[in-house]
Amino acid sequence: MTARVSVRRAMRSDLVAIRRIEETSFSRPWTSETFAEVLGAPEMDVLVAVAGGEVAGYAVLATREREAELANLAVSESSRGEGIGRALLARSIEVFRERGVRRVLLAVRTSNLGAMRLYRRNGFRAIGSHRSYYEGPSEDACIMLLTLQVQS
Ligand SMILES: CC(C)(COP(=O)(O)OP(=O)(O)OC[C@H]1O[C@@H](n2cnc3c(N)ncnc32)[C@H](O)[C@@H]1OP(=O)(O)O)[C@@H](O)C(=O)NCCC(=O)NCCS
């Protein structure tokens, strides 16, 4: 199933919805303060996916010149499997291109096969692992890389 979804830049008024999704998606969720900071930071982009009038997911992008990190991505539990993660990732990659990024890195729990599949289907490849990168529970990270070509 594919939801009717639009992706736009996050606003301060989205923070409550973003935090609610974060809380139910991760064992070590980012705090409200962290989200408030990234919303105001010039090197960060925060995108939200809106479906049925509600914030259904978000992505946090961190860019340092030509290198970037997909720092956070989540979709609300009740809206998963509807193409919202795919839409967020597609728009994130467009934003990276607009910023002139050549390499996008991300870290994902090695047990998170669904997320890894989403990333692989959108051009990321595994380039290594980071031992015991995560806590609660302790787990290795798979490091994935997307290389973006300069468009003429
Ligand atoms: C990972 C996550 C963002 C995917 O979002 P989603 O909206 O459910 O994903 P989509 O419906 O857009 O699926 C897109 C693709 O991702 C892959 N995928 C997503 N969830 C999957 C799952 N549970 N099992 C297998 N593949 C999955 C599939 O390849 C799918 O494409 P396909 O159906 O054409 O094969 C979502 O499950 C989530 O928020 N999880 C908790 C937070 C998290 O793990 N974030 C990533 C941290 S690195």
Image (tube, rainbow, N blue to C red):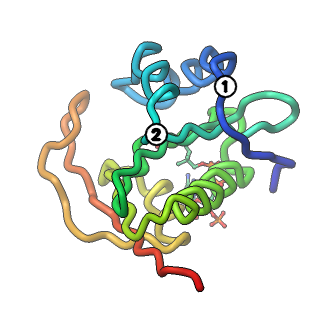
The relative height of residue 126 versus residue 83 in the rendered view (above or below) is below
**Which residue type does callout 2 highlight?**
Met
Residue 61 is tagged as none
Residue 22 image point, x, y percent: 51, 26
Residue 65 image point, x, y percent: 36, 57
Which secondary structure lies at badge 2? strand
**Which residue type does callout 1 highlight?**
Met
Q: Is residue 152 left or right of residue 78?
A: left
Q: Is residue 66 left or right of residue 48?
A: left
Q: Is residue 105 left or right of residue 127?
A: right
Residue 11 is tagged as 1
Relative to the observer, which residue lies in front, 51 or 71? 71
Residue 49 image point, x, y percent: 71, 40
Rendering quarter of residue 136: top left
Q: Of marks 2 and 1, which one's residue comes earlier in the chain?
A: 1
Disc 2 crowd rating (10 Å Cα; few below 14, some 14-19, many 20+) is: some
Q: Residue at 24% across / 32% down in the picture? A: 137
Disc 1 crowd rating (10 Å Cα; few below 14, some 14-19, many 20+) is: few
Residue 113 image point, x, y percent: 43, 57
Rendering quarter of residue 51: top right
Which secondary structure lies at badge 1? loop
The relative height of residue 18 versus residue 84 in the rendered view (above or below) is above
Q: Which residue is mark 2?
A: 44
